Image: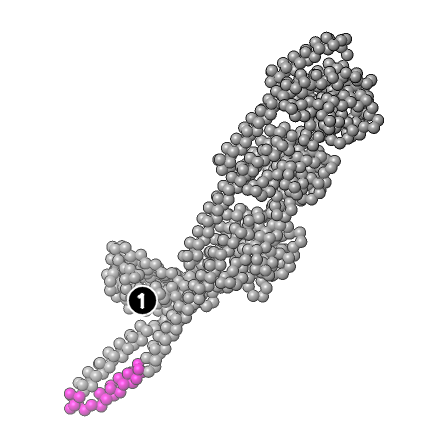
Amino acid sequence: MATGPSGRISEERAALRRVATLVGRAAPSEQVLAAVAAEAGRLLEADFAVLSRYDPDGTATVIGTWARTGPLPLAGGTRLEHGALSVHTLVFRTRQPARIDDYGDASGRGADIARDWGVRSVVGVPLSLEGRLWGVIGVASRHEELPADTEAWLVGFTELVAAAIANTQARAELRDYAEEQAALRRVATLVARATSPEQLFAAVTAEVGRLLGVDFTFLTRYDPEAAALVVGGWSTTDAAAPVPVGSRLTLGGRNVHTLVFETHRPARTDRADASGPAADVFRERGIRSCVGAPISVEGRLWGVMGVAYTHEEPLPANTEVRLAGFTELVATAIANAQARVELRGYAEEQAALHRVASLVAQGTSPDEVLGAVAAEIGRVLAVDLTVMGRYDPGGVATIVGKWTRTGVAIPTPRDGQVELGGQNVTTRVFETGQPARLDSYADTSGAAADIGRGWGLRSMVGAPISVEGRLWGIILVAYTHEEPLPPDTEARLAGFTELVGTAVANAEGQAALTASRARIVAAADTTRRRIERDLHDGAQQRLVTLALQLRAAQAAVPPAAEELADELEHVTIELTSVLDELREMARGIHPTVLVQGGLRPAMKTLARRSAVPVQLDVRVQGRLPESVEIATYYVVAEALTNAAKHAHASVVHVEVEPAEGLLRVCVRDDGRGGADLAGGSGLVGLKDRVEALGGRISLQSAPGIGTALEVALPLDHPSKRRLPR
């Protein structure tokens, strides 16, 4: 030691000047605190010196160390637990200087280290800042007991350096605060720019990692299945995060994720005391210590922000505090980002629902509506696959619509039918009439599960489609990657299932109406045919017979009865005229040539009788459904009549051709135009007849450019079409 009090005082002042110089230069806090420990050790001629800071629970963290020679027994960041017999514990309990000159009965990590390093005597004195116990300064000797006045000199030294330590801590805290605020401002800027959640989570983890100087940072979100989903990660080496985004960590055991989930409070684990599936994953990645703080969004536990070290020393004692303070603002950022995403998702969802509703209101066919719904759901929910199914008799579900994110077709059974049964979403919805979810195909069974595995599906949600109170079918959405579908998937599907139910109900009503109208038209045609037959077989035949009888009577009239012969000739001529009118009337009621020969000869007959030249192109082979032939006949007949009576056309083109399940009829003239579907009873009647058969009719007739009448008639009878059930 120094030769006398005056010499020690001089050395003490020199030590204080050196510390003050570091403080004045705004040296890093680690350098200042290490200098304080070194000055204390040299001043008291000790072998070792340690400066530690207390946590509220009495645990001490080493923040400055010094050794006269050789390596340091305690590295910065070493945590010394409270409760064991040690100088750190004694000072914390008594707020007074403490000494240990014999480690024979001492316990705890500090005592073990002292024995390992051959320490014989240790003295520690409290370090208070602003009237509060802040830490402890200790010196140790390996050769002899420290002098009796060591405590007094060390107390005096700590009182002198307390101001320097306070200034250093204030600078460090101010710097940390400034860095923290800058990091938060950068995150807030991303939120204000409506950055996607994925980018936001990546930025948050990077900011926290750099701010706290850790090796790894992770951000996970809790899901309802007692698991934590990794949504963000960062590594100090710019390498991939130790646990990739999208990984699911099963809760259980003693680890940060489980402790935070159970307590809703910050948690800390070291490699030695960690257990459970999540701890096993982290241990495999070389993580030795970990701290996590809860993220609560709108009063609900949302997830956990965690940081980790891969080296031996534990994370700093204030990590929980700094992390917790950061997560409060991060939670706000997440809430805002989620609100934006939800609002954007809601707007996209409403737009999709509007498009589907427009199709339903337009009376679009069920097949088109179901295909459009599958595509809209897939895009809005950002899934990999959407399937629409209809439950049919016989315990089967029939695929009626599907969509894939990649646009690549997926293999389906030849008849589109899947047998129900086993453990799978399709069967569960059928049995319960409620939405169902599947996050793993490990325990699934049945034909539907086999098809899903063949498609590479990993998770699936299904929602029932009900029509007028009865279960009609199902909407299925699925992921092909490991991540489960979001918890709100069932609720978001509900809006679409209601529209699909409405579309199916409308289709059923429209199909029933179409079938009813078709039956009425068929009944009217049958009545026409009966009337035509009755006229032909009854009145028409009687008139023919009567005409023959008159001819016979004429032949028997004597030459002298010239007046009688003239009367009979007049009656015969009138009778023949009536017979011709009756034949024409019968032909108009139901064309015999159509019944006997079909569409080709009937079209030739109409062209031959037309007052306007007709260029005929009929590409029909064989017979077509009777209702289609009759409708086509009347369409062409009415168009030719109008061209002659109203359009003053010089030529009419008639084209009749079957294509893609429809008979397409087009009648074009070069007349004066100006026709209107609503302008005459003939065209209105044609429109009703065509639509009653499920067909379409359109008229283009601008003045001065002629008229084009186009009709498309389904070639299958309405009663035979596949209608939704």
Q: Is residue 511 above or below residue 135?
A: below
Q: Residue at x 35, y 75 (%)?
A: 528
Q: Residue at x 54, y 31 (%)?
A: 184
Residue 474: x and y in percent read: 54, 57
Residue 492: x and y in percent read: 52, 51
* Dot 1: element: helix
Bounds of the magenta segment = 539-564
The majority secondary structure of the magenta stretch comes to helix
Circle 1: residue type: Ala
Image quadrant where one finds the N terminus: top right
Question: Would you say residue 541 sits in the magenta stretch?
Answer: yes
- Which image quadrant for residue 529? bottom left
Q: Is residue 59 above or below residue 548?
A: above
Q: Residue at x 40, y 65 (%)?
A: 693
Residue 87: x and y in percent read: 76, 25
Q: Residue at x 79, y 23 (%)?
A: 100
Question: Would you say residue 138 sits in the magenta stretch?
Answer: no
Q: Which residue is mark 1?
A: 637
* Circle 1 Cα neighbour tier, 10 Å, few/some/many (<14 / 14–19 / ≥20): some
